[in-house]
Image: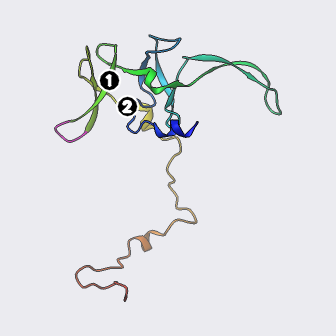
Amino acid sequence: MGWKAAEKLIRHWKVLRGDNVMIIRGKDKGETGIIKRVIRSQNRVIVEGKNLVKKHIKQGPGHEGGIFTVEAPLHASNVQVVDPVTGKPCKVGVRYLEDGTKVRVSRGIGASGSIIPRPEILKIRTTPRPTVAGPKDTPMDLVLEKTYDSKTGKGMPDL
C-alpha cells in the first residue's frame, strides 16, 4: 500500500466483524453476507462466500499446490450494513440511550431508525485471559500496598 492510501485510512469504522452487510458495488452487487474479517490497514473487509477468486498456489513442504477458490477483500465503501427491520442497506449512525449506553442505529432514506445490534462474535475472546499469575506478574500484596498518603504527604520523594 502506498503512502497516499495510508493517509486516507478510515478513522471511525461503521462496519464490524460479524455484521450482516450488502455488497453495493462489484460482481456480487446486491448479495448479502456476514463480515468475516476487517483489514483496517487497507480499508478492506472480507465477506463470507463473496468476491471469490481463483488463487494459484505452488506446492511446498507440508501442503499441496493447485488452484484454490478464496474470498478476496472488498473495499469498505463497497459494502453497507443491512437494516434489521427493512432488510435494505443503510447508513450507520450513533445514538445514546437514556441510560447513557452508546448504540448504532440505521440512517438514510428508507431506513427504519432501529437499533443495529452489536455482533455476538465480538463478545468471544480469541485468546482467553490468564487466570494464574505468571513469573513476570507483580504479586497482589505489592499491588495493594499503600505507598503514598495524600493527607500527610508521606511517600513523596525528596527533590
Closer to us: 154 or 46: 46
Number of residues whose C-alpha sits closer than 10 Å to that of mark 1, classed few (under 14), some (14–19) or many (20 or more)? some
Q: Residue at x 38, y 76 (%)?
A: 145
How crowded pointer 2 is (Cα within 10 Å; few <14, some 14-19, many 20+) is rated as some
Query: What residue do we see at 39% from left, 21% from top?
Result: 80
Q: Amino acid at mark 2?
A: Lys
| Percent x, y of residue 13 | 40, 34
- Which sits earlier in the primary sequence, circle 2 or circle 1? 2
Amino acid found under the numbered disc labelled 1: Lys
Q: Residue at x 42, y 26 (%)?
A: 19
| Quadrant showing the N terminus | top right
SS type, badge 2: loop
Q: Which residue is mark 2?
A: 14
Q: Is residue 67 magenta?
A: no
Residue 26 vs residue 70, the one in the foreground: 26
Residue at x-position 44% and y-position 74%: 142
Q: In this figure, which residue is indicated by the disc labeled 1?
A: 91
Q: CA distance from mark 2 to mark 1?
A: 8 Å
Tell whether 19 sits left or right of 52. left
Which residues make up the magenta segment?
97-101
28 w.r.t. 71: above or below = above
Whether the residues at callouts 2 and 1 have beta carbons within 8 Å, the answer is yes
Q: Residue 150: give its label.
A: none
Image: 33 above or below 37: above
Q: Main secondary structure of the magenta part?
A: loop
- In the rendered image, residue 156, in percent from the top left (x then y), is placed at 34, 84
Seen from the viewer's position, the closer of residues 11 and 118 is: 11
Q: Farthest residue toward the bottom?
A: 158
Label tally: 2
